[in-house]
Image (cartoon, helix red, strand yellow):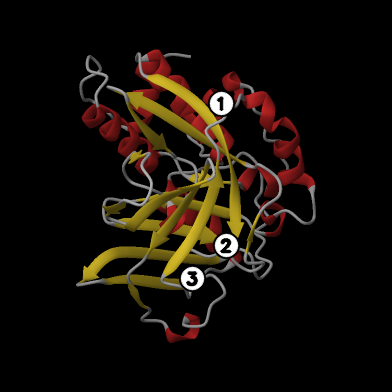
Amino acid sequence: MNLEEYFARTGYKGSLEKQDLETLTDIFQHHIRAVPFENLSIHCGEKITLELEHVYNKIVQRKRGGWCMENNQLLGWVLKCLGYDTSFLGAYVFNPHQNTYATLMTHLLVKVVIDGKAYIVDGGFGVSYQMWQPMELVSGKDQPQAPGVFRFTEKNAVWYLEKMRRKQCIPNQNFSNSDLLEKKECRKVYMFSLEPRTVEDFRFQCTYLQTSPDSLFTKKSICTLQTTDGFRALIGWTFTETTYNYKENMDLVEFVTLEDEEVEKTLKEKFNITLDRKLVPVNVKGSYTI
């Protein structure tokens, strides 16, 4: 495991000398545009493990992506190696269909402190809820980014993340009522406390999420990657490409349904992913919006 190989994977060629916000943001943006948020292992007969060496091999050497416990663990390792003050936190993800937060802590986050200011660095959420810049950990402050306006709110030592989106233009009207589309303009994303966590705190969740029939991740095969002007997503057989702010206060969301034989080609061409085993796409309705 070495940083040079990781930066070759993400394409980052900037400074490594300064532990400042500008450098952190640049490293972070290269990661989210090179490394997909994906759970394809579950749907091609592989097991997801949390050992850092396995995560490194999968993402850096095999050029795959991963979910939050993989992406953010790797990011945390990189930042710590560079001298950043980092720690892990655990979040409870909001379920829009049940209109409540999960009771299981399934989302791994990275907290970074620079010059006494705390930031949340989350490279493992994907789609339109993926932040593009580290977020300052302050309550009640709108933090506009390319994907929309993010905001933390703190109440009784619990922090809540929400996101306000733009209007959406959907050229393919067959998808105008797709369950993948978020209908609310303001959407809760997750809640968390500032209690430091370790990767060990996520062992049970890692197994549960890839084996339980109630898990979102067994119900949907997901691959999503941020681009310079939006993001791409492949959910089951549905490929979407979103362009942020393509008109004033409007995002363009383009949908297409793939045939079985197009899935592998799309993964290679749009996400730079080549799987070792055959993918079985899955898309059970509900519980996930882009």
Label 2 is placed on what type of residue?
Glu
Mark 1 to mark 2: distance in Å? 45 Å
**Residue under the point 35% across and 17% down:** 4
* Residue behind mark 3: 182
Q: Nearer the viewer, mark 1 or mark 2?
A: 1
* Residue behind mark 2: 261
Label 3 is placed on what type of residue?
Glu
Mark 2 to mark 3: distance in Å? 28 Å
Residue 48 place in picture, x, y as percent: 67, 35
Q: Is residue 236 above or below residue 131?
A: below
**Residue under the point 67% across and 32% down:** 202
**Residue under the point 77% across and 56% down:** 214
Q: Nearer the viewer, residue 115 or 81?
A: 115
* Residue behind mark 1: 196
The secondary element bearing badge 2 is classed as helix
Q: Nearer the viewer, mark 2 or mark 3?
A: 3
Q: Quadrant of residue 83?
A: top left
